[in-house]
Image: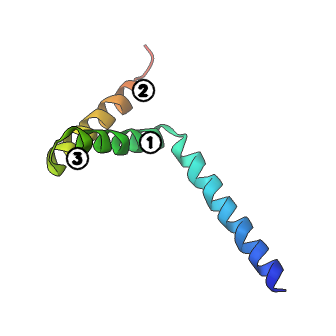
């Protein structure tokens, strides 16, 4: 019974990972990933935390708006 319980927990974990991966592949998820990667790159480049956070947010919002531009 304990083995089945652990198997069930593993399957639930895989389902949550699948849902999270599906979210990351949406445009909002991509913006979040870009923001986090930009933040880390700016911190490694020597920016302070506040400036890196603001700049990473601006980069992510700019790319998000460029990606979601309506077609004319």
Compare marks 2 and 1 and give the one earlier in the sequence.
1
Whole-percent x, y for residue 23 in the image: 54, 48
Instruction: Point out which mark residue 67 bears.
Output: 2
Q: Check the image and report above or below for 34 versus 21.
A: above
User: Alpha-carbon distance for marks 2 and 1?
Assistant: 10 Å
Instruction: Point out which mark residue 53 bears.
Output: 3
Say whether marks 3 and 2 touch (CB < 8 Å). no
Q: Between residues 1 and 41, which one lies in front from this camera angle?
A: 41
Q: Residue furthest top?
A: 72
For mark 1, give the secondary structure.
helix
Q: Residue furthest bottom?
A: 1
Residue at the location (66% across, 65% down)? 13
Whole-percent x, y for residue 37 in the image: 37, 41
Instruction: Point out which mark residue 28 bears.
Output: 1
In the rendered image, the quadrant that contains the C terminus is top left
Instruction: Point out which mark residue 69 bears.
Output: none
Compare marks 1 and 3 and give the one earlier in the sequence.
1
For mark 3, give the secondary structure.
helix
């Amino acid at each position: 019974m304990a083995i089945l319980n652990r198997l069930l927990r593993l399957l639930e974990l895989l389902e949550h990972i699948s849902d999270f991966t599906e979210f990351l592949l949406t445009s909002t998820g991509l913006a979040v990933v870009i923001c986090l990667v930009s933040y880390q790159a700016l911190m490694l480049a020597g920016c302070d935390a506040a400036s890196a956070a603001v700049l990473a947010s601006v980069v992510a919002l700019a790319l998000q708006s460029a990606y979601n531009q309506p077609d004319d």
